[in-house]
Image (cartoon, rainbow, N blue to C red):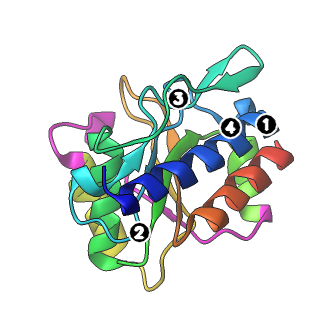
Amino acid sequence: MNEQDKILCENLKACADRFVSANIYKVLPEIGMNIGYTVCGNSVAEVCDIPGRIRRVEKDCCYVRDPKMGGSIYMAETLLAIRKKFPQAQCVANLRSNEKILAACKELDFAMVDMPTPPGYWQLGNDYFVDLEKVIAECDDLPDVITIPDRINLEKLILVVSADLEDFADKVLALNSMV
């Protein structure tokens, strides 16, 4: 692992430790929180993530593996899709979506955009990435939150997006403090 990748992994580990210390279980989705983080990456291999995600276990949260490069294809591709329009984007993560969390996003004055509900609530093939790229293409500025609609067999989520890891962590912790 090169020095830059090592620094990315160390920084993401420190961020994950902050989340565990703050016990952010209330904002974690059932599937766990997946984070994609890069400073200048252009491929999945250049995006840092936490293998196994940050998990909610009853009223606690934890992660079981240290961050590494190139492990999360889905979140890495999400971040890379956002970076096509907003190359300054460094972080993206999935969080639970519910009335309290959405209300907190609004109260915090987060810039929000909504992905469309797929026809019949079925999201097939690469529909997610097609919809994500369409929504991002319509944005003038990097949004703080992208809502992902209800879909059959998939959990309703939000994506928290940021141009730097510290701001990203602050957004997640602010949301957690309000729910």
Q: Is residue 65 left or right of residue 99?
A: left
Sequence-first tag of 3 and 1: 1
Callout 3–callout 4 Cβ contact below 8 Å? no
Instruction: Kindly state the secondary structure of the residue where label 3 is placed.
Output: loop
Sequence-first tag of 3 and 4: 4
Is residue 103 magenta-colored?
no
Main secondary structure of the magenta stretch = loop
- Mark nearest the camera among 4 and 1 is 1
For the residue carrying disc 3, how many other residues have a C-alpha within 10 Å: few (<14), some (14-19), or many (20+)? Answer: many
The correct choice, above or below, for 26 with respect to 92 in the image is above
The correct choice, above or below, for 67 with respect to 107 in the image is above
Callout 3–callout 1 Cβ contact below 8 Å? no
Instruction: Kindly state the secondary structure of the residue where label 4 is placed.
Output: helix
Instruction: Kindly state the secondary structure of the residue where label 2 is placed.
Output: loop
> Which residue is under mark 1?
21
The residues tagged by marks 3 and 2 sit, at their Cα atoms, a distance apart of 23 Å
Q: Which mark is residue 39?
A: 2
The residues tagged by marks 3 and 4 sit, at their Cα atoms, a distance apart of 10 Å
> Which residue is under mark 4?
27
Q: Which residues are magenta?
A: 107-127
Residue drawn at the location 38% of the way across and 60% of the way down: 3
> Which residue is under mark 3?
32
For the residue carrying disc 1, how many other residues have a C-alpha within 10 Å: few (<14), some (14-19), or many (20+)? Answer: few
x, y percent for residue 151: 38, 34
Residue drawn at the location 48% of the way across and 83% of the way down: 141
